[in-house]
Amino acid sequence: MLIAQITDFHVGRIIETTAGPIDLYHRLLEAVDHINALDAQPDLVVITGDISNHGREEDYIRTKAALDTLKMPYLIVPGNHDHRQRVRDIFSDHGYLQSNSNFLNYTIEELPLRLIALDTLDPGQHHGLLCNERLQWLEQTLSEQPNKPTLIFMHHPPAPVQYPYMDAMNCKNGDKMKQIIEQHRQVKAIACGHLHRDATVNWADTLLFVTGSSAFSYDLLMDEVPDIDPVFEPGICRLFYWSENTGLVSHLTFIGDYPGGVTEGVPTPPKSTP
Ligand SMILES: [Fe+2]
Ligand SMILES: [Fe+2]
């Protein structure tokens, strides 16, 4: 089974650069094209939040229209820039979002890997939050299937990654989540977004993957800084491959065209003769 993760589209934001404005909606279209053209087609795409930059209805509508051109099903997890009820309303054909719960937590049960999506949105805040209600839901949900290999998706990283500016706005109560995860060894990995950089952490006796944005990055800033500016690097799509034989394997692919470099057509240098 192959799952693709893309994250942090921020549709609705236009970033000024010295080369002119970049409309992040176009970066979303590139990400969709990238996944549709992958040699190994994912069975499913998971989108881990900050879908829109301002939570505006019109941005969700055009984002949904683009995502609906994916060749495979996709799942939505909200981020701090998202509006929970608008996500629920506009992705109204996504049944897993249509519960009576206060939160967009859900599980996907019918795959070889069990998927758990955690809603870490704390409205009006850039940090995330796992309140007692959400922590209890996680504990109960994990207890229901202790032997099924499980992958958790959430927007905010629940642990610091030596990126002080963003660590200050990661998921509150990550220490309480850690205690729960340590009791449930079926959790093969946790996958987040929010950082706009890639990082991997050995956390809670499992792997925590923080996946960079498909739209834009921030510089790697491991010291305290007062502010950060966006930079443009290749957009990222993370793949999770799962089989009984390999266990969980993760690869990155990079969105965009990168001509040049070594090709099969480059002649091999002749061996030197004595
Ligand atoms: Fe973001
Ligand atoms: Fe975020």
Image: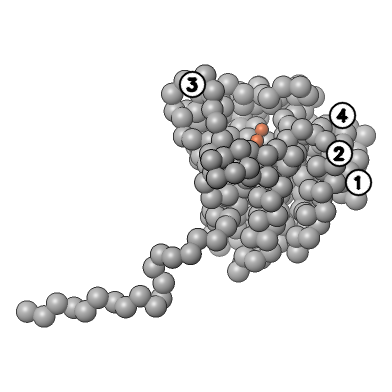
| Residue topped by disc 1 | 92
Which tag, 4 or 1, sits closer to the chain's start? 1
In the rendered image of this protein, does residue 13 appear above or below residue 222? below
Q: Which residue is mark 3?
A: 225
Q: Residues within 10 Å of mark 1 (few under 14, many from 20)?
A: few
User: In this picture, is 158 found above or below 185?
Assistant: above
Circle 3 sits in a helix, a strand or a loop, which is it? loop
> Which badge, 4 or 2, is on the more N-terminal residue?
2
Do we see residue 67 in this rendering?
yes
Tell me: 65 left or right of 89. left
Three-letter amino acid code at the position of disc 4: Asn
Q: Residues within 10 Å of mark 4 (few under 14, many from 20)?
A: few
Q: Residue at x 76, y 22 (%)?
A: 124
Please, what is the three-letter code of the amino acid marked with disc 3?
Val
For the N terminus, the image quarter is bottom right
- What residue is drawn where x is 93% and y is 34%? 100
Give me the disc on residue 102.
4
Q: Are marks 4 and 1 in contact (CB under 8 Å)?
A: no
Element class at badge 2: helix
Q: CA distance from mark 3 to mark 2?
A: 33 Å
Callout 2: CB less than 8 Å from ligand 1: no
At mark 4, the secondary structure is loop
